[in-house]
Image: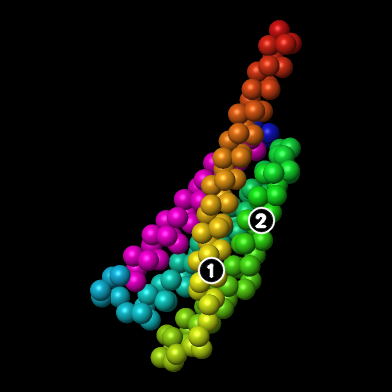
Amino acid sequence: MKKIAGCSFVITFIWFGFICAISFMEAPVKFTAPLLSLEAGLDVGRTVFAALNKIEIFFAVISLILLFIDSFNKRIKTVFLFILIILALQTFWLLPSLDERAEIIIGGKTPPDSNIHFYYIILEIIKAFSLFFLGLLQINHFKLKSLQENVNKNAAA
């Protein structure tokens, strides 16, 4: 089981890939499609980002379990906690607020001015960089652990 936990970087980079594919590719491309109305784009966006959020929560739970199985260092735990805080802000504050704004626009009204979308984008960028950094830390942890195991095997032989 510890071997699986040592490969936690795989989950981290898959999570990173999902964010890059959806937030930094699908979302911007969707709004350049000439036949897609703003209302339809917002409706699709709400659905896609709700699904992405559920997938991210799944990755966070799996990562948390792996964190308890393996003895990761404080740096890895701190970066992971930072990512969890961002995910919580997005899940419980930003996504519901963005859904509310989308509902208003889909209903044909104009919502009041807000920076909420800007905050979401900034946190998404920070989260993506943090996940990438976390993955690198996990790879280094895995390599160091493998090296130590090899040294211990050679010393025992």
Q: In terms of depth relative to the viewer, which is nearer, 100 or 125? A: 125
| Residue 30 against residue 7 in the figure, above or below | below
Q: Position of residue 154 (x, y in %)?
A: 68, 11
Horizontal relation, residue 34 to residue 43: left or right: left
Magenta stretch: give its range. 5-31
| Residue at image coords 71%, 39% | 72
Whether pointer 2 and pointer 1 mark residues with C-beta atoms closer than 8 Å, the reply is no
Residue drawn 74% across the image and 11% down it: 156
- In this rendering, the answer to whether 58 lies above or below 68 is below
Give coordinates of residue 103: x percent, y percent: 48, 84
Query: What is the quadrant of residue 138 in the picture?
Result: top right
Does 11 appear above or below 99? above
Give amino acid for label 1: Tyr
In this picture, residue 65 sits left or right of residue 12: right
Rendered position, 78 above or below 56: above
Residue 84 highlighted magenta (yes or no): no
Residue 82: image tag: 2
Quadrant where the image shows the C terminus: top right
Residue 108 occupies which quadrant of the picture? bottom left
Q: Nearer the viewer, residue 131 or 91?
A: 131
Q: Earlier in the sequence, mark 2 or mark 1?
A: 2
Element under disc 1: helix
Q: Is residue 14 magenta?
A: yes
Residue 120's label in the rendered image is 1
Count numbered badges in the picture: 2
Q: Looking at the image, which residue is at 45% across and 62% down? A: 23
Q: In the image, is 34 to the left or to the right of 4?
A: left
Task: Residue 33: give x, y in percent of width and height.
Answer: 28, 70
Label 2, secondary structure: give it: helix
